Image (cartoon, rainbow, N blue to C red):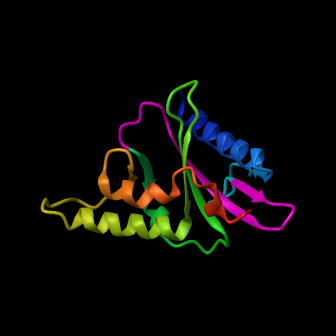
Amino acid sequence: MQKGIIGVAGEYFAAAELSQMGIVATLTLKNTPSIDILATNLENGKFANIQVKTMSPGNKQGWRLSKKDEEKSTIKNHYYVLVNLQDVGKLPEYYIIPQAKLAKYLYDDHRGWLAGNIKRKDTTMRIFDPYRKKIPKEFGEKYKNNWKILDLF
């Protein structure tokens, strides 16, 4: 699957999940910074601004994020939905994480990685891998497939 198609597939899957729950989910134009889906509950007026990051089938490294993902956002009700596409024919898994919580996690995790026993060169890449690593698994457990985190209901 091509990189651009993977990202779009994740956005559509996340929007479909929200729509199935009665939430109006609109994909933004591709040049909209930091927001891929605008989600609104028309019954109570609650909304969420969602950035989607998608992990392709066969990915063995977790979600690849960047240094900008560890910076606190000024966008109100800002969330990340991390989509694991898994294999064709299997439903995706989702991690729904408030942006500020993910930013802090990435910041702390990267600083810990740099301070490890091995001298490392700093990089702009950040990895979130709850499938193969204990600390991100423990951090991510309460966010896994937990759409209520969005506080739209």
- The magenta stretch spans residue 51: yes
120 within the magenta span: no
Which residue shows up at 28% across the image and 61% down it? 122
Q: Is residue 144 left or right of residue 47?
A: left
Between 93 and 69, the one lying in front of the other is 93
Position of 101 compared to 109: left or right?
Answer: right
User: Which quadrant of the rendered structure holds the C terminus?
Assistant: bottom right
Observer-nearest of 143 and 129: 143
Would residue 62 appear left or right of 84 to someone viewing this image? left
Q: Is residue 80 above or below residue 145?
A: below
Q: Quadrant of residue 112?
A: bottom left
Residue 67 position in % (x across, y down): 43, 62
Count of numbered circles on the image:
0
Name the outermost residue toward the right: 43
Q: Is residue 30 above or below residue 79?
A: above
Q: Is residue 26 left or right of residue 72?
A: right
Of 58 and 141, the residue lying toward us: 141
Pinpoint residue 103: horizontal percent, then vertical percent.
Answer: 47, 67
- Confirm whether residue 129 shows in the render: yes
Residue 124 visible somewhere in the drawing: no
Residue at image position (73%, 63%) is 152
Residue 145: x percent and y percent? 56, 50
Q: Please report the bounds of the magenta region as a residue range.
A: 37-61
Tell me which residue sits at (78%, 67%) in the image. 46
Residue at image coords 83%, 67% = 44
Position in image of residue 24 (x %, y %): 81, 53
